[in-house]
Image: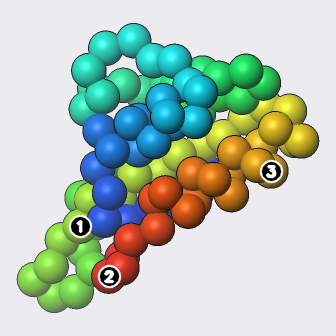
């Protein structure tokens, strides 16, 4: 399970689709994306980063073939990296 701050569920799903995943429905409503040898479940919530600042935190739980996940996690992490989170 990995948490990413400063990206939206829509953007996380977009990245996962670009990495070969399939999902049904609009990006901002998708809860699961499935690729060849992997599956990612998504959850998004608002979290407090400082006294008056809230950010969206997207938690992605990855499952699948460890050899596939190593590359996928690296590539997704590079896309999802954002400053300020």
Mark 3 or mark 1: which is in front?
A: 3
Upstream in sequence: badge 2 or badge 1: 1
Residue at x 39% of width, y 12% of height: 24
Q: How crowded is mark 2: few (under 14 residues within 10 Å), some or many (20 or more)?
A: few
Residue at x 65% of width, y 23% of height: 35
Q: In this view, does 81 lie above or below 20?
A: below
Residue at x 41% of width, y 35% of height: 13
Q: In which quarter of the image is residue 57?
A: bottom left
Residue picked out by circle 2: 84
Residue 32 lies, in percent from the top left, at 49, 25
The type of colouring in the image is rainbow
Q: Residues within 10 Å of mark 3 (few under 14, many from 20)?
A: few
Mark 2 or mark 1: which is in front?
A: 2
Q: Helix or strand or loop: what does disc 2 sit on? A: loop
Residue picked out by circle 3: 70
Judge from the rendering whether residue 50 lies leftward or rightward of residue 2; answer left or right: left
Cβ atoms under marks 3 and 2 closer than 8 Å: no
Cβ atoms under marks 2 and 1 closer than 8 Å: yes
Is residue 17 in view from this perspective? yes
Judge from the rendering whether residue 41 lies leftward or rightward of residue 36; answer left or right: left
Residue picked out by circle 1: 55
Upstream in sequence: badge 3 or badge 1: 1
């Amino acid at each position: 399970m990995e948490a990413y701050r400063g990206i939206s569920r829509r953007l996380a799903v977009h990245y996962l689709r670009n990495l070969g995943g399939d999902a049904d429905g609009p990006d901002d409503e998708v809860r699961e994306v499935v690729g060849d040898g992997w599956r990612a479940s998504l959850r998004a919530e608002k979290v407090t980063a400082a006294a008056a600042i809230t950010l969206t935190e997207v938690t992605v739980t990855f499952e699948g073939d460890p050899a596939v996940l190593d590359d996928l996690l690296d590539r997704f992490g590079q896309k999802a990296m954002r400053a300020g989170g």
